[in-house]
Amino acid sequence: MPAPFAWIRAEPHGIHVAPADCWIDPSQPVERARVTHGHGDHARGGHGQTVATPATLAIMELRYATRDGATPVEYGETIRLPGGVEATYIPAGHVLGSAQILLEHAGERVIVTGDYKRRADPTCPPFEVTPCDVFITEATFGLPVFCHPPVGQEIAKLLKALRDHADRCVLVGAYALGKAQRLIAELRGAGHHEPIYLHGAMERMCRLYEEFGVDLGDLRLVSDHSKDDLRGAIVICPPGALNDRWSRRLPDPITAMASGWMRVRQRARQRNVELPLVISDHADWGELTRTIEDVNPAETWITHGREEALLRWCQLHQRRARALALAGYEDEDD
Amino acid sequence: MEEFAALVDALVYTRSRNEKLRLLADYLTRTPDPDRGWALAALTDCLSFPAVKSSTIRNLMMERVDPVLWVLSRDFVGDTAETASLLWPDAKGAVAPPPSVTEAVEALGRMTRMSVMSELPKLLDRLDANGRYALIKLATGGMRLGVSARLAKTAFAQAFAVAVEDVEEYWHGLQPPFAPLFAWAAEGAPPPRTEDLPVFRPFMLAHPLDDVTVDLEDYVAEWKWDGIRVQLVHAGGETRLYSRTGDDVSGSFPEMAGALSFPAVLDGELLVRGSHQGGEAGGAASFNALQQRLGRKAVSAKMLAEYPAFVRLYDVLILEGEDLRDLPWTERRARLEALMPRLPRERFDLSPVVEADHFEHLAEIRSRTRDEAIEGLMLKRKDSPYVAGRKTGLWYKWKRDPLLVDCVLMYAQRGNGKRSSFYSDYTFGCWDGDPDAGAELLPVGKAYFGFTDEELKQLDRHVRNHTTNRFGPVRETDRSLVFEVAFDSVHASKRHKSGLAMRFPRISRIRWDKPAEEADRIEALRALVKD
Ligand SMILES: [Zn+2]
Ligand SMILES: [Zn+2]
């Protein structure tokens, strides 16, 4: 009898499912890829075949300008892969289209989470706790210092800054896929129905979200408006544009950034952020550890992020765990 | 404590001096006594709680958090206070409401090495993460919020619409929480009494003499000596020596502390004996010799013998209970001259008046001066009272070498080769307007020579102790140190934000004694542009 879980292996450039000869979130082009979600470090281009949710495929098409080999799979749908492997895509609550992939083979169940969070997000269905033997979890915010406050509290901070400075604008740096749209949806949910102004790089992704039924309200492009139009308004740009020449066209912006990293003062100061907003699409320490307890797997494998601390937590709680050394994943600006 | 924590947090993220002033002034006006006084003391690092150390915090955390998780977290966050504030477990069950700043300060003051491990947790349990951060920073010292004493005083003056010079004078004799200061500024009580205290009186300062000429009927000329401007105060049986920043430097110059034995406040230039800078009591050494004596806590007998200090007097402010500051310069000068015989000759001499028939004659005298250690000329209006700060038209300084500017250190970077472990490359800036009205610093140049190895060590230490931000190999400092920068010429440049580029800038002197607010403005540099 083969060793338990020998059919699934962590290789430096992704997770390999041997009987089906396919890869989960590979960081290099492969023949057969199964992709959890559309963020760049998970969804690379150039694969022969890509199986993912329709939204993830649409996001990849936006980025790589091709649908070649795209094979959609709905949440909850089970597909048969060669070699007696079944795969089921389950909501991960991370961004639009994000999925955990449940793999079943020879009576063993393995879940690859991709990225996930446990909090409510108006732009995607919530994470579903699914029993399994091996739980392969992310660990982006895998340190006990990370505790994301309730999103409403951060949105209130943003709206207060806006009210206090009627002649300025609040410029929020937010990751173009997921964070930006969630931020807009949360603002709408909090009753902010004013136009929100976008950096050009954000527009197409927002439109894609709307095509998938996420209402984002009145969105406008900064480039179509004068400085005066932007006074008292919220402007959203990719984090990289925050301190860039581009922002000179704005009326004395208050620099904000929506990211889980904003929990740490030095991180916020490094980016010259005046208004840090601790909003993340990743699980914080409490969510990571609670999820391991909820899923209660026989083994926990930990991927990209701060593996060491989560590994230590598993040890302290008598849980079998190991860290996978995967290459090519970055800390998302998230 | 929540309001204070919110202020600390806002200051952490605010880079503009103007906005810092606004935040501080706003806090001071809406916070009751004595909370605001304690807060002010905490922000300006005037409080010390010896029982609470960084190691205390670490030990407390070890009792509550797994040591491995603590180390991983501390390494990631990079700051013990912040890591502890984030990891402190929420209290179980009902807790008392957050303490006020006063309650926290009083409780911290009562703590001993024995009791701190049980008492500090009681305070931390009552606070959220931001409150814990503020409390730990307050308790362990070193807020590093870029709030200098000067900034705090300016904010205080702004909050209560009083003169910053008055704040400076009254502040000096008081202990936290500065109740009489708030009573005076906020409630109109009489100002705190300072006559019997050896407190610092703000200096009268000069404007640069740019394109102006003055009539020597109305103005008198004096040399501007190249030492350290000091104020010597004797009151209530004590003698103190204050630097330009109002720092008490008596400890570094014990021979001066013993030299004045009757109640007086004197203004002069601190010098060290040598062959330059002639005067009545003999010569003075160059500024470099004086540098040997600066910033030393303990002064050896050898130092005292090799580099004996003395003060070359410019002015007398107060004499035996009589405040002379409202008298015209000529009368103060007469009183000063009359006073000289009462002072020991080896410790004092009088800065002579430079005789000239007319302005052009004075210009000629100035240009003929070869003494390396004369900085230039001072022009003082004969009828001017002694007023704090810089009032237009009363005093002018006329520097000998026009290609010198005082800049503020902004960034430092590690050097190359044998200097790779030192922060030895410095970027400095000038003010783009009045710093007290919220002007910012604009970088004007970079220099990496002009200082000795010993000074490099001191500068490296300064950079490390005053870092407010890091960008890779570059450290941003709290903008508290002034460099006198020498350069060959300055040109207009589109590549620089300041619009100016200096040719061969070098550090000519490190002005440990000069407040950053008094560094030059960008106009001073712009006026030197030759293209
Ligand atoms: Zn992601
Ligand atoms: Zn990821």
Image (cartoon, coloured by chain):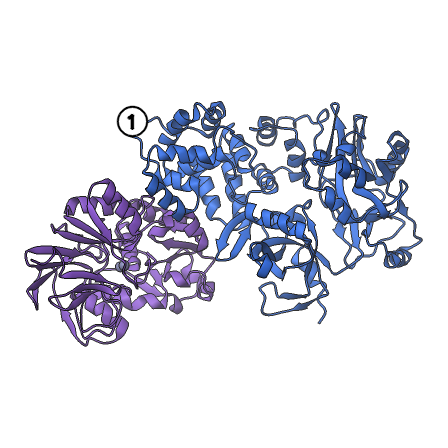
Q: Is residue A129 above or below residue B32?
A: below
The 10 Å Cα crowd at callout 1, few under 14, some 14 to 19, many 20 or more, is few
Write the residue at 60% across / 56% down.
B424
The secondary element bearing badge 1 is classed as: loop
Taking the image in four quarters, ligand 2 sits in the one at: bottom left
Instruction: Give how far across and how far down residue B516 sits, in percent.
Output: 64, 48
Q: Is residue B30 above or below residue A266?
A: above
Instruction: Give how far across and how far down residue A278 sits, in percent.
Output: 34, 49
Quadrant in which the C terminus of chain B is drawn = bottom right
Name the residue at the right extreme.
B357
Q: Is residue A314 left or right of A153 when viewed as pictured?
A: left
Q: Which chain is purple?
A: A
Write the residue at 37% across / 43% down.
B71
Q: Which chain is blue?
A: B
Instruction: Give how far across and how far down residue B16 sits, in percent.
Output: 53, 51
Of residues A2 and B432, the one drawn nearer to the viewer in this rendering? A2
Is residue B393 among the parts visible in the rendering?
no
Q: Is residue A6 above or below residue B43?
A: below
- Label count reads 1
Q: Is residue B506 left or right of B443 when viewed as pictured?
A: right
Chain where mark 1 sits: B
Q: Is residue A277 left or right of B196 when viewed as pictured?
A: left
Name the kind of residue labelled 1 in the image.
Answer: Ala
The answer to which quarter of the image holds residue B238 is top right
Name the residue beneath numbered marker 1: B94
